[in-house]
C-alpha cells in the first residue's frame, strides 16, 4: 500500500502529490500537482509555468543532482520556497518570524547582487 510517504510534497498545499500534469494554454505550458480525483474532477494545485523561474522537479531535491550543471540560484530559491511551505503550517507568531527570516535573506541576497555590480 502506498501511504504517500515517498511522494513529493506539493509546494502549494503541502500534501503529497501523485504526479505532475501539464496544461498548454495559448502556447505556454503550465504545471499542476495532481492529487488524485475529487469526485470526477482531478484535484490539481497550480505550480507555475513550465518555462518559468520555478523548476518544479528541482524544487524538492533542491537541484543538487549534478555538481557540474547545478544552478545555485535555483537551489537558493528552492530552499527558500521549501522554508516558506513548511512555515505555512506554523502558528501565526512562527509564520511572522519565518517571514522576517525570508525578508532578511532577500536583503542579504540583494547585497550580494549589488556587490557584483561594483
Ligand atoms: Zn497541492
Image (spheres, helix red, strand yellow):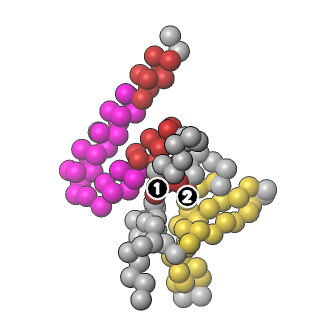
Q: Which mark is residue 45?
A: none
The answer to which of 22 and 73 lies nearer the viewer is 73
Foreground residue among 86 and 3: 3
Q: Does the magenta stretch include residue 106?
A: yes
Residue neighbourhood size for the residue with mark 2, other residues' Cα within 10 Å, grouped as few (<14), some (14–19), many (≥20): few
Q: Position of residue 92 (x, y in %)?
A: 24, 54
List x then y, in percent, for residue 2: 43, 84
Q: Mark 1 points at which residue?
A: 61
Alpha-carbon neighbours of circle 1 within 10 Å: few (<14), some, or many (≥20)? few
Start and end of the magenta stretch?
Answer: 81-108
Do tag 2 and tag 1 residues touch (Cβ < 8 Å)? yes
Answer above or below: position of 4 versus 78.
below
Residue 95 part of the magenta segment: yes
**Secondary structure of residue under mark 1:** helix
Q: Which residue lies furthest to the top in this view?
A: 118
30 relative to 35, above or below: above
Residue to which mark 2 is pinned: 57
Report the predominant secondary structure element of the magenta stretch: helix
Q: Measuring from the top left, give residue 1's x and y in whole percent.
A: 41, 89
Rendered residue at 32%/33% (across/down): 104
Q: Nearer the viewer, residue 1 or 35?
A: 1
Identify the element where label 2 is drawn.
helix
Q: For the point 55% across and 56% down, which residue is it?
A: 56
The residue sitting at 79% across, 56% down in the picture is 27
Image position of 110 with respect to 78: above or below: above
Amino acid at each position: 500500500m502506498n501511504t504517500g510517504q515517498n511522494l513529493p510534497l506539493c509546494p502549494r498545499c503541502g500534501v503529497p502529490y501523485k504526479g505532475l500534469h501539464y496544461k498548454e494554454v495559448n502556447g505556454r505550458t503550465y504545471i499542476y500537482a495532481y492529487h488524485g480525483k475529487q469526485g470526477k474532477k482531478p484535484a490539481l494545485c497550480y505550480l507555475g509555468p513550465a518555462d518559468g523561474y520555478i523548476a518544479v522537479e528541482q524544487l524538492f531535491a533542491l537541484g543538487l543532482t549534478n555538481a557540474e550543471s547545478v544552478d545555485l540560484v535555483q537551489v537558493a530559491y528552492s530552499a527558500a520556497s521549501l522554508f516558506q511551505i513548511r512555515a505555512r503550517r506554523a502558528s501565526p507568531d512562527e509564520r511572522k518570524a519565518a517571514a522576517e527570516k525570508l525578508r532578511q535573506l532577500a536583503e542579504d541576497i540583494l547585497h550580494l547582487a549589488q556587490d557584483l555590480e561594483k
